Amino acid sequence: MKVALFEKPHQLKVTHKDLRKLNEDEVLVKVTACGVCGTDLHIVEGSSRSSPPVVLGHEYAGIITDVGNEPNGFAPGDHVAVDPNIACGTCFYCRRGDVHLCKNLRALGVDIDGGMAEFCIVPSSQLYRLPSTLTLEQAAFIEPLSCAVHGIDRAQIRAGDTVVILGGGTVGLLMLQLATISGASRVIVVEPVEWKRGIATRIGAFEVLDPTVVKVFECIMDLTGEGADVVIECAGRPETTSLSLTLARRGGTVEWFGVCPLGATVQVEPNSVYFKELTIVGSYVNPHTFDRSIALIAANKISFRDFVIDKFPLDRVHEALKSLAEGKTIKSLIVPTL
Ligand SMILES: [Zn+2]
Ligand SMILES: [Zn+2]
């Protein structure tokens, strides 16, 4: 089968790989679509951890074509999404229920062969059954949405809150919709790219700000009076990470969701956190949020209609990564059957 194999930094190759025999609890998934994510870019650049050689791709869905002897009720023909994060189940954190903090966490598409391939072998414990009515675009968004759902849980938005989102890419636009669903009365999106601000406006932002033109702090204070109840950083940049602390009201919550480059640091004046009694939260991957993510998409609560989604066959994986890196698309999807 054809795969996109990450061999070492700056070396991603489209090649052939033989499928091995399925273990008892494994299934074979024919991949229908696999999203390309910032993490994939970081892995290829060598700035994010992985275990090469490995087939990339952790945001994928597909159809089961074969099963091992104990497939946990899954059968050929089932449409499934794949939770790529495999926890050990026995470490200190797993036993507390914090599976995403597992000390032995491994991920499909990072440490084990993932979804940028015609087929992928997946432990049945990582599968979620999907309604067959979901489009391949919808199915490929389940994984990133499940991460955003965990982020929204962590942000603790209350009905009527004003929420500021820094960054209007894939995650920012998902967060905008989730914040609205969670009861935010106003969501303000800060994004330098005009067409991305256009999407944010169309899917319900109360206000969009271009940080290259306006002074974001002054604008947020004008709009909110006291600052935002909740600020969610989705750009993964040190500048926006420190800016986020200034935009929250006293007693507000700041979530650092975006992934800054490894080793990046941010200057924080501790007194600003102390006197404002800020709550700063992190959010990592997607513990126990796949079912809710699928439910939201199946109920059409999350719209991708206005997103710019570009589809690429496996042979053009480099173009797919480039298109995402250059910010030309909200999502690049690898569709192996193209
Ligand atoms: Zn991802
Ligand atoms: Zn564990």
Image (spheres, rainbow, N blue to C red):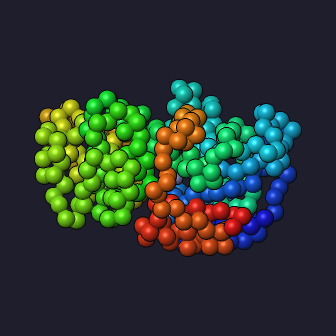
What percent of the width, then of the height, locates residue 32?
69, 56
What percent of the width, then of the height, locates residue 216?
19, 55
For residue 248, say whether it is visible: yes
Q: Using the image as rendered, state which of residue 52 and residue 324 is in the foreground.
A: 324
* Residue 6 vertical placement versus 206 (above, below): below
Q: Image point 65% across, 62% down: which residue?
A: 335
* Residue 324 vertical placement versus 125 (above, below): below
For residue 246, say whether it is visible: no
Q: Is residue 311 left or right of residue 26?
A: left
What percent of the width, then of the height, locates residue 69?
87, 38
Q: Image point 43% across, 47% down: which residue?
A: 174
Q: Image point 52% across, 32% down: which residue?
A: 98
Outermost residue, top side:
96
Q: Image point 29% across, 63% down: which residue?
A: 192
What percent of the width, then of the height, locates residue 201?
33, 53
Q: Is residue 55 left or right of residue 28?
A: left
Q: Using the image as rendered, state which of residue 13 and residue 307 is in the foreground.
A: 307
Q: Is residue 204 left or right of residue 73?
A: left
Q: Using the image as rendered, state which of residue 335 and residue 263 is in the foreground.
A: 335
Q: Indicate the quadrant containing the C terminus: top left, top right, bottom left or bottom right.
A: bottom right
Q: Indicate the quadrant containing the N terminus: top left, top right, bottom left or bottom right.
A: bottom right
